[in-house]
Amino acid sequence: MSQPKKAPTIQDVARFANVSTATVSRALATPGRVSQSTRDRVLEAVHVTGYTVNQAARSLRQHHARTILVALPDIRNTFFSTILDAIERETTSRGYGVLVANLYLGSATAKRLQDYMLSNRADGLLLLDGSIDPETLNVLSRPPHTIPLVLACEDVPGTNFHTVVTDNASAAERATRHLLDLGHRRIGHILGPETNVVARDRFAGYAKALQQAGLSPRAEWLFRGSFEMESGFAAAARFVSLADRPSAVFAVNDEAAIGFLSGLRQHGILCPRDISVVGFDDLTVAPHYSPPLTTMRQPREMLGRMAAETLIDLLEGTEPQRGPVRIVLNSDLIVRESTGLPPTT
Amino acid sequence: MSQPKKAPTIQDVARFANVSTATVSRALATPGRVSQSTRDRVLEAVHVTGYTVNQAARSLRQHHARTILVALPDIRNTFFSTILDAIERETTSRGYGVLVANLYLGSATAKRLQDYMLSNRADGLLLLDGSIDPETLNVLSRPPHTIPLVLACEDVPGTNFHTVVTDNASAAERATRHLLDLGHRRIGHILGPETNVVARDRFAGYAKALQQAGLSPRAEWLFRGSFEMESGFAAAARFVSLADRPSAVFAVNDEAAIGFLSGLRQHGILCPRDISVVGFDDLTVAPHYSPPLTTMRQPREMLGRMAAETLIDLLEGTEPQRGPVRIVLNSDLIVRESTGLPPTT
DNA sequence: AGGGCTCATGCAATCGATTACACACAGCTG
DNA sequence: CAGCTGTGTGTAATCGATTGCATGAGCCCT
C-alpha cells in the first residue's frame, strides 16, 4: 500500500476507464476519433490516476524527442542569455523542451555536440557559436545523420545552413558614420577576437565607413581584444600610452566599451568631453551607465524567436523547404551621451 | 542506397560483430564481462557503423533520463545565467544534460513544472525560484512522484528540501554596517519584491544592522522595487522628492543600485560626494561602473556547482541521505568607490 | 434484404536498449 | 570420472506509448 508506488501508465488509465490502451492514446492525441462517452471516461481516468505521458516511451516510438539543443559560447553573457530566453519562450510555446550546452572554446566541442545530437535526446540544433569547425557541422547535417540545424547570431563561414543573424557589418558602418557625422576624423576601434565572424564583420563595417570618408584604419588605433570588459579595460591602458590619440572609438560591443571607459576614467580621460565612444548591443546597463552609452541596438529577442521558429518549422516540415533560409535583422543606432563633438584642440 | 539511411542501432552493431545485442550492450556498459576478442570486435563494429546509443530507448528501459531540469525566474539576469553556467559545467561533467525552464511569474508555473517532471524527461529538479507555491513542490517531492529536488538561491518558506543558498541576511547586515562604520546614520534601502524571500532576508539584515546601532528603518527611506534597474531608477525619482534625504542607501542588488545612481545623476546628485550606495551581487559591471560599486560578492559559481552536485548525488543515491542538507555560502564585502564618508552638512 | 459505408474500438507489432535467466563449455577437485 | 564452479554468450522479456490492421456495430441506399 504505502510502497513507493510507481508512476501511473497508460495501462492503468485503460484499466480504470475500461478501454484498451489504444483508445486511451487516441482519446488523448486525437479526441475527435473517439466517442464522446469514451472520451469522458478516459479523461476522468487520467484525472483520477494522475497519469502523465512517459516521454521516453513516446520518443522511442515516434523517433523524436520534442526537444532542441541550444549550443552557445557563453551563457553568462547577457547578450546570449537574452537570446536564450527568447528561444525558450518560443520553443516552450510550441511544446518543445530546451537543452543547453555551453561550448567553452577548445573543449572537445565537436565530439560533445555529436554525442548529444546523435543520441536522440534532441531533434535539432540551434547553434549560437560561429567558432565551430565547419566540417563537424557538415557531418551532422548530412546523411546518415541529417540533423536539422539553424545558425543564429554567428555565421559559420564555408557552410550553407539556415541562418538568422543581424546586420553586423552595416550596423558597424552606421555606428562609425555617426562618429564621422559628428566631425570625428581620428577614429579607433576595439576589435573582438580575431577568429570571430561577428567581430570581423564589425571591423569590416568600421573600415568601410572610414573608407567612404576618405580615411583608413590606422594600426595603432586598433585595439585587439575579446568581447569582455576586461579587454576594453586593457585597451584603455594601451590607448593612454599613445602619443597621438583618436578622438573617438567604436567598440565591438558594449562590454568592451564599458571596460574601456572605465580604464580611461582611471587616467583622467573623460567621455564625452575628451573622447567619444560607441558600443554595440544596447545592454540593459547601457542607458544607465555614466555616461549613458551610444550604441547599436540589436533585436535580440526577435533574433532568438526567429531562430527558434525557423528550427521548429524545419523539424515539423511545415515550410516547403526551398533551400537554406537566411534572415538578416536590422540594428538601430541609439544615440545617448557617450558621443559628442570632437574636442576643439 | 542513397536513401536517408536510418541511424544505426545496436542490432546493426551486433550483426556486424557477429554477436547478440546483449553482448554488444555488455561490451559497452561492462567491458570486463566480455572476452577480449569479442570486445575488440564490438568496438570495431561500433566504429564502422557509427553507432550511438538511443537515449530514448535507454531511458525507457532504465527509468531515468540522465537529465535534470533547471527552473529559474529569469535567464536574462546575469546573476542567474552565471549560476546556470556553473550548473551546466558540473552536470555535463557528470554526464547529465540540462533542460531549462524559464518561469515567468504568473504563468501556470506549477502545472508546467509538473508536466515536465512527471513525463520522465528529467530525473530531478533544480529550482532557483523561491516564489513558487510550496504545495506544488510538496506534491512533486512526495509519493507517488518523489521527484528529487534541490532549492538554490532562494528558499521556499514552509518547505524542507535540500537547499543551497547564500547568507543574505547576514551579508545585508554586513553591507549596512559598512555604511554605519563610515559614519552614516541616515540610511535608506531599495527593497526587492515584497514576496521574494531573498529580498525579505536582505531587508531583515539591513534592519538588524540599524537596530544594533540604535536606529530603525524609516518608512519614507524604504523604496519598494524589483530586482531590476528600472526600479532603482524609479526609486531615484522618489528619493529626490524627499525633503529629508538619507546620506546612504543599501540596494537589494547591483542592478537596483545602478539604476538608482543613474537616476540620481539626472538630478545632479553625485555618488560618493552626495550619497553612498552599496549594492549586492558584484556583477561584472560593478568594478567598471562610475563610480565603481561597493557591493557584496556572492559565490555564484560555487553556489551553482554545489547545487548541481547535491542534486546529482541525490539522484545517484551516493550520499547516505540523512535528511535534507542545507548549505549556506558566505558573501564578501567588496569596498570600492560608491561608498564614502557622509557629506559634512 | 443485402451490399457497402463509416465510425469506434481492440489486438498486437513496434520503437531500441537492457538484463534476468539459461546454457554451453572449460577447468578444477576429490 | 562425476560433479562443481565460473566464464562468456545467447534468448527472450521488458520498459510505455503509438499505430496499422482487423473487427463489429450501425446506417443508408437501392
Image (spheres, coloured by chain):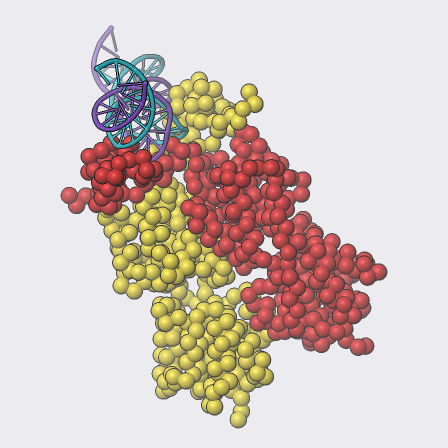
Chain colours: A yellow, B red, C purple, D cyan
Hey, which residue is sitting farthest right in the picture?
B214
Compare residues A22 and B324 and report the one nearer the observer.
B324
- Residue displayed at 66% across by 64% down: B333
Compare residues C19 and A154 and report the one nearer the observer.
C19
Count up the numbered dots.
0
Is B274 on the left or on the right of B9, as rendered?
right
Compared with B190, A141 (above or below) is: above
The image quadrant where one finds the N terminus of chain A is: top right
Hey, which residue is sitting farthest left in the picture?
B1
Compared with A36, A108 (above or below) is: below
Is B148 on the left or on the right of A162, as rendered?
right
- Residue displayed at 49% across by 86% down: A241
User: Which image quarter: residue B254?
Assistant: bottom right
Residue A56: percent from left, percent from top = 39, 36
User: Which image quarter: residue A158?
Assistant: bottom left
Residue B295: percent from left, percent from top = 65, 65
Hey, which residue is sitting farthest bottom in the picture?
A345
- Residue displayed at 74% across by 53% down: B204
Residue B268: percent from left, percent from top = 69, 76
Residue A276 visible in rendering: yes
- Residue displayed at 45% across by 62% down: A299
Compare residues B92 and C2 and report the one nearer the observer.
B92
Residue A313 visible in rendering: no
Compared with B244, A324 (above or below) is: above
Residue A42: percent from left, percent from top = 46, 24
